[in-house]
Image (cartoon, rainbow, N blue to C red):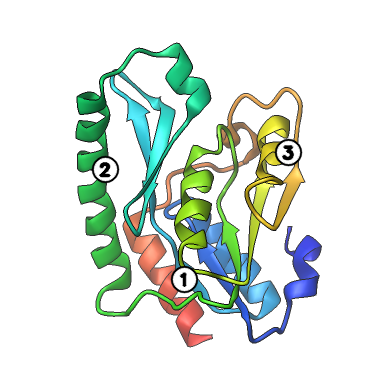
């Protein structure tokens, strides 16, 4: 995937932002290959109550909430239920922000080329929320980069960001984890360690 991003190597205006936790190990390798700084951009999926794996939307740093219109058409859920899920995820987002970043300020992305990295795209609601939140901070360019994506999600993104790089778009897709030899969950400790290592390089 980094080979498809070589135009962004060794540039002072490029910043790689990972979506924790799964996106951090991928983004670490991308940042290293491009010789670009690495940081995080926090987004939390809003799971449908009782079917949490199904994303009805997502929230991101900066108070942005994006709802997945396709999912919302098929389920009947009250605004109060959505708000309750969002409030719970907001608390987790804030906990992780403190845990991963500590006293370090969030990066200033204004005028920068931001490469947003995750471990893959299924419905894409998490990445859509990240891109919407990031757009409010006025970067010069937003590039989404993932190793694997559902075909229709990768295509859909071309409308919402400046560029998208999906290394592979297998058919049938099923789930992101199917395309990894090791898809064990990245821990909070691993996130902190990779961010610290990137800062020292």
Question: Looking at the image, which is closer to me, 43 or 186?
Answer: 43
Q: Secondary structure at mark 1?
A: strand
Which residue matches tag 1? 39
Disc number at residue 148?
Answer: none
Q: At 33% from the left edge and 79% from the top edge, which residue is drawn?
A: 105
Q: Could you tell me residue 108's position as x and y percent?
A: 45, 78
Task: Give the answer, above or below, for where 80 lies relative to 128.
Answer: above
In the image, 15: left or right of 43?
right
Q: Quadrant of residue 170?
A: top right
Whole-angstrom CA distance, mark 2 to mark 1, is 21 Å
Q: Secondary structure at mark 3?
A: helix
Image quarter where the C terminus lies is: bottom right
Whole-angstrom CA distance, mark 2 to mark 3, is 28 Å
Which residue matches tag 3? 155
Q: Could you tell me residue 76's position as x and y percent?
A: 34, 12
For marks 1 and 3, give the one nearer the viewer.
Answer: 3
Image quarter where the N terminus lies is: bottom right
Q: At 55% from the left edge and 38% from the top edge, which residue is drawn?
A: 124
Task: Give the answer, above or below, for where 80 lies relative to 140.
Answer: above
Which residue matches tag 2? 89
Q: Residues within 10 Å of mark 2 (few under 14, many from 20)?
A: many
For marks 2 and 1, give the one nearer the viewer.
Answer: 2
For marks 2 and 3, give the one nearer the viewer.
Answer: 3
Task: Give the answer, above or below, for where 98 lies relative to 12.
Answer: above
Whole-angstrom CA distance, mark 1 to mark 3, is 26 Å
Q: At 76% from the left edge and 26% from the top edge, which residue is drawn?
A: 171
């Amino acid at each position: 995937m980094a080979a498809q991003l070589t135009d962004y190597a060794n540039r002072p205006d490029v910043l790689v932002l990972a979506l924790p936790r799964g996106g951090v190990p991928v983004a670490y390798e991308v940042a290293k290959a491009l010789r670009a700084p690495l940081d995080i951009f926090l987004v939390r999926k809003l799971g449908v109550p009782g079917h949490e794996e199904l994303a009805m939307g997502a929230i991101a740093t900066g108070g942005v909430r994006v709802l997945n219109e396709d999912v919302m058409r098929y389920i009947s859920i009250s605004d109060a239920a959505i708000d309750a899920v969002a409030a719970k995820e907001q608390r987790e987002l804030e906990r992780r922000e403190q845990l991963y970043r500590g006293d370090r300020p969030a990066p200033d992305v204004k005028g920068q080329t931001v490469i947003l990295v995750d471990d893959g795209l299924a419905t894409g609601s998490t990445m859509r929320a990240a891109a919407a939140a990031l757009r409010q901070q006025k970067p010069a360019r937003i590039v989404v980069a993932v190793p694997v994506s559902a075909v229709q999600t990768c295509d859909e993104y071309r409308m919402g960001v400046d560029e998208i790089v999906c290394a592979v778009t297998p058919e049938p897709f099923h789930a992101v984890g199917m395309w990894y030899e090791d898809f064990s969950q990245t821990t909070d400790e691993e996130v902190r360690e990779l961010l610290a290592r990137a800062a020292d390089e």
